[in-house]
Image (cartoon, rainbow, N blue to C red):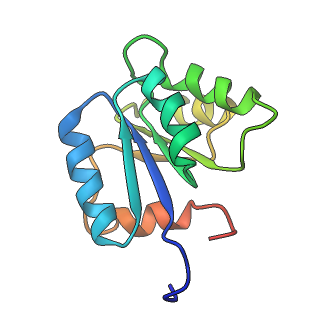
């Protein structure tokens, strides 16, 4: 990354504060700009304010779940291009396909592999990065 490039903006949407702390640390150490939201209303506010390049979307959120929130974000005609990545411990057969059908661009399973996580996220960023 050149010194003139802006760091990728990553929004973590997860109701587990320990997950947020760990992911924020790993991605920040990799030079990414990170924000977080604990639920769907906070995520919608952060999307407007922070304008993320990529959202790590927990699928199991209180209230509006991650799939419904992803569909809502994708239905907005004014939504800026951003990657939405399912970020979940769900690993049942067919779950990844459901997340992709809901509008996710990729899937990262929890628990994360700390040594490869930043590279995994970077690989899912929109091509403009």
Query: Residue 1 location in percent, x, y?
Result: 50, 84
- In this orientation, which residue lies closer to the viewer: 115 or 50? 50
- In this orientation, which residue lies closer to the viewer: 48 or 22? 48
Q: Residue at x 56, y 30 (%)?
A: 94
Please state if 87 lies on the left or on the right of 48 as rendered.
Answer: left
Count every numbered label the image shows and give the total: 0
Query: Residue 29 location in percent, x, y?
Result: 27, 70
Does residue 93 show up?
A: no
Q: Residue at x 53, y 29 (%)?
A: 44
Query: Residue 90 location in percent, x, y?
Result: 39, 30
Residue that sits furthest to the bottom in the current view: 2
Residue that sits furthest to the right in the current view: 77
Q: Residue at x 69, y 69 (%)?
A: 128
- In this orientation, which residue lies closer to the viewer: 49 or 29? 49
Please state if 120 lies on the left or on the right of 85 as rendered.
Answer: left
Residue that sits furthest to the front in the current view: 49
């Amino acid at each position: 990354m050149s010194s003139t490039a802006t760091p990728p903006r990553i929004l973590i949407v997860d109701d587990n504060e320990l997950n947020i702390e760990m992911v924020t640390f790993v991605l920040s150490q990799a030079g990414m700009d990170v924000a977080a939201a604990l639920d769907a209303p906070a995520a919608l506010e952060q999307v407007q304010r922070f304008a993320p390049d990529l959202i790590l979307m927990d699928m199991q959120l209180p209230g509006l779940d991650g799939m419904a929130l992803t569909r809502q974000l994708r239905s907005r005609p004014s939504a800026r291009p951003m990657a939405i990545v399912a970020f979940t411990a769900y690993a049942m057969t067919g779950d990844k396909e459901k997340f992709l059908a809901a509008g996710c661009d990729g899937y990262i399973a929890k628990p994360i592999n700390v040594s490869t996580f930043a590279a995994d996220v970077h690989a899912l960023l929109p091509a403009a990065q």
